[in-house]
Amino acid sequence: MVLKGINLTGEQKKVLFLPATNPIQIKGVAGSGKTTIAIYRAKHLLETYSDLFREAEIMIFTYNNCLIQYIQSLLPYVIGGYQENSDARNPSTKGLGVNVSTFHKWSYGFLKRNGVFNDYTQMERSEHNEILSHAITETRKSFQRARILDKPGNFFDEELSWIKGQLFKTLNDYLSTARIGHGTKDRVDKKDKAVIWNVYETYRLEQISRKKIHFDDHATYCLNLIEKRNIQPEYSHIIVDEAQDLNKAQIMVIKSLVKPSTNSLTIIADTAQRIYKSGFSWTEVGINVRGGRTVELKKNYRNTKEIALAANSLMSHDLEDDDLTAMDIDSITSHGDKPVLIYYRDIEDANRSLVERIKEAKCKG
């Protein structure tokens, strides 16, 4: 098992002893051990900050099911006992019992427990596509010359998801917010936004009439429930791994689940690995991680120097993100072949090549 006998380094160990109250942020480059640190932070908090009467309740949120399975496979092997000002360790009981979930898995259970799915049902992908297509067709009747409607369905998928994630309530909210994080390919002006908003409203009306909930709606429903029923926070500490891939609404839900007595949020992110750029700041959601509440992990323990140099070169051309963590190239001692850039005709061709390369690597191993 990968985690057996692990020893955290200086910069990794420092994270364990950051304040256990109020939010902190760990920004780390790829291969810096962020997920491992998330687990050890949970172990340290559980051992150190439980009171005499009740053990601390800790939740780890991560982005997808693969990461859940990975983290759960490591939990039985976690050993704490780190000392802040000493290299000596007092090994504690092996294993870590905490909750691990994706946001959508947690939110589905939360909505179900609170009766939302007594009146609504979860929307299937095929029905979402059908409703979206209907919304675009209906919008064409009012905006016949709008070229933005010629965009493919995945463009509207992402845009509607972004609108929901930003918790926009009106067209003016949408118009007044910069479309940060959508790249330079799809330029959208105010006229385009008016058309997109019409698609969004038409989609929502049809969705409501069918009593369907899309995964992108989960955060809004959760926030409404928490406020309406005055649902009290249940966790002493929450650790969010891969936080860069959660949107504003989801982070606001997670923030509301932490007990005010600790307000303990550990946010672990790497903007360079962002899959879906959500376009919001921590300040917008009431999270202060400025100053000494942010730690940057710059050492890469996974890749060769050649891979790291190639990655740094790509990141240096990211014109949209000024929040990237620079990788410490000098700390990398392993070497290998230079990365090769390969162009494929389509995704199927790329997948076939990937399978072949994995098979070749297994044979060599």
Image (tube, rainbow, N blue to C red):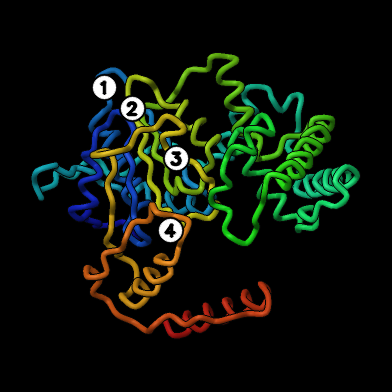
Crowd class of label 2 (few under 14; some 14 to 19; many from 20; radius 10 Å): some
The kind of residue tagged 1 is Asp
Q: Secondary structure at mark 1?
A: loop
Crowd class of label 3 (few under 14; some 14 to 19; many from 20; radius 10 Å): few
Mark whose residue sits in front, 1 or 4: 4
Mark whose residue sits in front, 2 or 3: 3
Give the quadrant of the N terminus. bottom left
> Residue at horizontal 40%, vertical 70%?
311
Give the quadrant of the C terminus. bottom left
Mark carried by residue 281: 3
Q: Name the residue tied to disc 2.
A: 56
Q: Secondary structure at mark 2?
A: loop
Give the distance between the C-alpha atoms of the residues marked 3 and 1, in whole angstroms: 33 Å
In the rendering, at what x and y percent does residue 281 appear?
A: 44, 40
Q: Name the residue tied to disc 1.
A: 51
The kind of residue tagged 2 is Ala
Q: Name the residue tied to disc 4.
A: 272
Q: Are marks 2 and 1 in contact (CB under 8 Å)?
A: yes
Q: Secondary structure at mark 3?
A: loop
The answer to which of marks 3 and 1 sits earlier in the sequence is 1
